[in-house]
Amino acid sequence: MFRHTLNSVPGQFIMLWIPGLDEKPMAVAQDDGKILKIGVAKVGRFTTHLFNRYKVGDRLGIRGPYGNGFKLPESADPNPRQRKRIALVGGGFGTPPLVFLAQEARKKKIEVDFIEGARSADLLLYLKEIKKLGVRVHVSTDDGSEGFKGYAPQVLEQLLEKNKYDGVYSCGPEVMMKKVAELASEYNVDCQLSLERFMKCGFGICGACCMDNTGFRVCIDGPVIQGEKALKLPEFGNYSRDSGGNKK
Ligand SMILES: Cc1cc2nc3c(=O)[nH]c(=O)nc-3n(C[C@H](O)[C@H](O)[C@H](O)COP(=O)(O)OP(=O)(O)OC[C@H]3O[C@@H](n4cnc5c(N)ncnc54)[C@H](O)[C@@H]3O)c2cc1C
């Protein structure tokens, strides 16, 4: 959390700088004009250094915001029956930007179904915060330790069967987002996904985050992309590239 604002919108990201070590992209989890939040998973060298060496009050570098951000449907109708309704599908550390999106949607009086999926109950992130937002919360865990036993897109499919949505938004593991995009296409609902690719500059110069065969630069043309467009990218849901450009 930083006592700072970048006037960012949900879906945008910052580059977080640890002097002398590296810079890494992190999605904005909140930016209300006073406080800027990110949620970081401890996965490797950079993030372990951050968790182990930094404490409240220490200084870090941030630059941004970068990227395009999610677009919400326009909705100001005071009649609850006429209000727009969206579904958000978050998996793992894809959840933080969707918490920010849900906050902005509620400000616009948009009805929100928030689906959060994780491998097990202890890996469900931000659930307390999400429950306070005035959204309908749906939980899935692979092992059934909380909520629906199975995957988040299965919950989405049940909801798409029952309700009419004005948009589906997703951030998380790419296999999950691919399924979400396929379902949205099947049910003819607008779909926006937030992609992750290896980034160096963050603003479209270095080419590290280009998606194959298109020149789509995730940092500047994304990270938010229409589901239909993502489904046409050969690498979407299949592979990505590491810092040296090798497939993984
Ligand atoms: C647009 C965007 C938003 C992101 N938002 C978040 C977030 O909100 N919270 C969060 O915890 N993580 C987020 N990430 C991922 C985060 O940048 C990586 O987890 C982090 O860089 C890992 O660094 P590391 O040295 O600790 O781990 P490493 O062991 O170096 O990497 C672990 C994995 O993180 C990814 N990664 C590493 N370096 C980069 C890089 N420069 N650019 C992109 N991915 C990288 C790779 O998939 C790698 O396999 C985001 C990435 C992108 C592209």
Image (tube, rainbow, N blue to C red):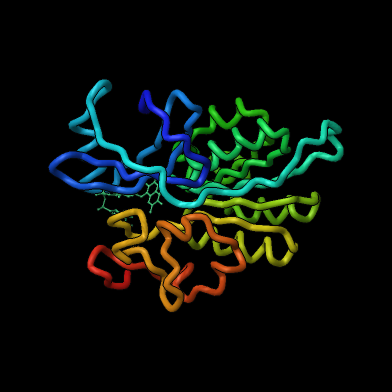
What residue is drawn where x is 50% and y is 42%?
Answer: 97
Residue at left offset 63%, top offset 41%? 114
In the image, taking residue 118 as reference, residue 147 lies left or right, namely: right
Residue that sits furthest to the left in the current view: 20
In percent of width and height, residue 203 lies at: 36, 55
Q: Is residue 165 visible?
A: yes
Q: Position of residue 188 (x, y in %)?
A: 74, 63
Residue extending furthest toward the bottom: 213
Quadrant including the N terminus: top left
Percent of width and height locating residue 217: 41, 64
Tell me residue 91's x, y (percent): 50, 48
Q: Nearer the viewer, residue 241 or 20?
A: 20
Closer to the camera in the image, 123 or 56: 56
Q: Quadrant of the C terminus?
A: bottom left
- Most distant residue in the top direction: 57
Count of numbered circles in the view: 0
Q: Is residue 239 left or right of residue 77?
A: left
Residue 143 at least partly seen: no
Residue 198 versus residue 98 in the image, above or below: below
Res. 207 image quadrant: bottom left
Of residue 68 and residue 150, the one placed in the foreground of this image is: 68
Q: Residue at x 66, y 30 (%)?
A: 107
On screen, 147 above or below 215?
above
Please give left or right for residue 217 compared with residue 233 in the image.
left
Instruction: Tell me which corner region of the image, top left, top right, bottom left or bottom right, holds residue 200.
Output: bottom left
